[in-house]
C-alpha cells in the first residue's frame, strides 16, 4: 500500500470532493481518482460513493478517515524527528518558567546546556503567570501542577515534594499547632488558586486524608516569595522540598507534622507541537529529561520518588 494514497484519501474525506482534493494537493483530479481506487483495491472494500457533485464516505471510509489524521500525523512526526537528528541546534531559544524554578534550578542547568550547544542563545522569561506559548512566541515552558487538556505537548520531568514549614521565630511568637486543625487559627502564607481563593491543603497519613482550608493572612502568587516570607516569620506555609530542605539543615525552618504527607506537584516541560520541532527545542527537552534525576537539584532524594518514565 502506498502511503501517498492514504494521504490523498484523507484530503478527499476532509473536503468530500475529488476536485477540491486535487486543487488542495496540487495534482490532477485523475490522480486523485486513481489513488482512491488503488486504496480501495488494497483494502478490498469501497471507501466512498461518488456522484457528479458529491462524495459520501461509506462505513469503512468513515472508520479509515477517523484514523487517517493520527496516522499521517505520526508519519510526519517520525520523518521530522529523523530529519532533525543530524541537525545542529542553533539560534534563539525562548523559555518561560516560574520565578522560583528559574532562580533555583534553571540558573544551574542553563549554563550547562549552553556549554553543550555553543550555537544556541536563550531568552528566559520568569513569571508567576501562565504564558500563552504560541501568541507570545515562546518555544518551551516549565509548568507546575496537572496539565489541562490542550494542543500543547507536555512531558513530565518529575515531582516536587512539599512540606509544611514555619520558622523558629514564628513558633516562639505563637504556640506551635498541636493538630492539623489548629492551622486554621494560625497565620498562614499561601498561594491563591485559579479562582483567586486560597488553596486547600490535603494531608495523607496511613490511608487517612485530612483536608485543611487555611484562612491565609498573606496571599502571594510566587512560591519563592512564600519561602522567603516563611523564613522571616510571616507564618506557616507549604514549601517545595528543594527550597526548604537546606533550611532544615541550618535550622532556619522547622518541618511541622512530618508524619502527614502533602501531595507532590508534577513538573512538566511543555512545547507547542512535536511536528517540525526545531533542533534547539528538541535538544533542550532531551537535556531536561536527562538532567532531572532523583536526588539531583530540585528532585529531592529525601521524600521525592523516581520521575515517571519519559521514553
Image (cartoon, grey):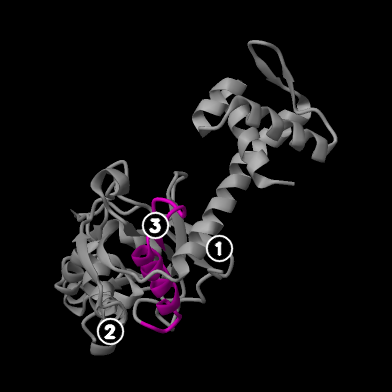
Q: Residue furthest bottom?
A: 250
* First of labels 1, 2 by sequence position: 1
Dot 1 and dot 2 residues touching (CB under 8 Å): no
Q: Quadrant of residue 22?
A: top right
| Residue 91 point in image, percent of width and height | 25, 65
Secondary structure category for the residue under label 2: helix
Instruction: Give the mark toward the camera: 1 or 2.
Output: 2
Answer whether residue 119 is magenta in the image.
no
* First of labels 1, 3 by sequence position: 1
Q: Quadrant of residue 268?
A: bottom left
Q: Nearer the viewer, residue 193 or 82?
A: 82
Please state if 182 lies on the left or on the right of 294 as rendered.
Answer: left
Pointer 1 residue: 208
**Marks 1/2: CA distance?**
29 Å
| Residue 92 in sight | yes
Magenta residues? Answer: 268-296
| Residue 112 point in image, percent of width and height | 29, 81
The disc label shown at residue 270, or none: 3
Pointer 2 residue: 246
**Marks 1/3: CA distance?**
34 Å
Answer whether residue 294 is magenta in the image.
yes
Secondary structure category for the residue under label 1: strand
Q: Residue at x 77, y 26 (%)?
A: 59
Please state if 229 lies on the left or on the right of 162 as rendered.
Answer: left
Report the number of discs.
3
Amino acid at each position: 500500500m502506498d502511503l501517498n494514497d492514504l494521504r490523498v484519501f484523507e484530503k478527499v474525506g476532509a473536503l468530500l470532493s475529488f476536485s477540491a482534493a486535487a486543487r488542495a494537493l496540487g495534482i490532477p483530479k485523475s490522480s486523485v481518482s486513481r489513488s482512491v481506487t488503488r486504496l480501495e483495491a488494497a483494502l478490498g472494500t469501497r471507501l466512498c460513493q461518488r456522484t457528479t457533485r458529491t462524495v459520501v464516505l461509506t462505513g469503512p471510509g468513515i472508520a479509515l478517515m477517523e484514523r487517517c489524521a493520527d496516522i499521517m500525523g505520526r508519519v510526519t512526526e517520525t520523518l521530522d524527528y529523523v530529519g532533525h537528528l543530524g541537525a545542529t541546534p542553533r539560534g534563539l531559544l525562548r523559555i518561560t518558567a516560574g520565578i522560583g524554578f528559574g532562580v533555583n534550578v534553571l540558573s544551574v542547568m542553563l549554563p550547562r546546556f549552553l556549554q553543550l550547544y555553543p550555537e544556541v542563545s536563550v531568552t528566559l522569561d520568569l513569571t508567576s503567570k501562565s504564558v500563552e506559548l504560541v501568541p507570545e512566541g515562546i518555544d518551551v515552558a516549565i509548568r507546575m501542577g496537572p496539565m489541562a487538556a490542550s494542543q500543547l505537548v507536555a512531558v513530565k520531568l518529575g515531582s516536587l515534594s512539599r512540606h509544611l514549614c514555619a520558622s523558629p521565630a514564628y513558633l516562639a511568637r505563637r504556640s506551635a499547632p498541636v493538630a492539623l486543625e489548629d492551622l486554621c487559627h494560625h497565620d498562614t502564607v499561601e498561594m491563591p488558586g485559579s479562582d483567586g481563593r486560597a488553596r486547600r491543603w490535603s494531608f495523607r497519613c496511613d490511608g487517612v486524608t485530612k483536608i485543611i482550608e487555611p484562612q491565609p493572612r498573606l496571599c502571594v502568587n510566587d512560591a519563592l516569595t512564600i519561602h522567603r516570607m516563611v523564613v522571616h516569620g510571616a507564618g506557616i506555609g507549604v514549601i517545595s522540598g528543594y527550597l526548604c530542605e537546606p533550611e532544615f539543615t541550618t535550622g532556619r525552618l522547622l518541618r511541622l507534622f512530618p508524619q502527614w504527607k502533602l501531595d507532590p506537584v508534577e513538573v512538566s516541560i511543555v512545547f507547542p507541537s512535536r511536528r517540525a520541532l526545531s533542533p534547539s527545542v528538541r535538544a533542550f527537552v532531551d537535556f531536561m529529561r536527562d538532567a532531572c534525576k532523583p536526588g539531583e537539584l530540585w528532585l529531592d532524594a529525601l521524600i521525592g520518588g523516581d520521575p515517571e518514565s519519559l521514553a
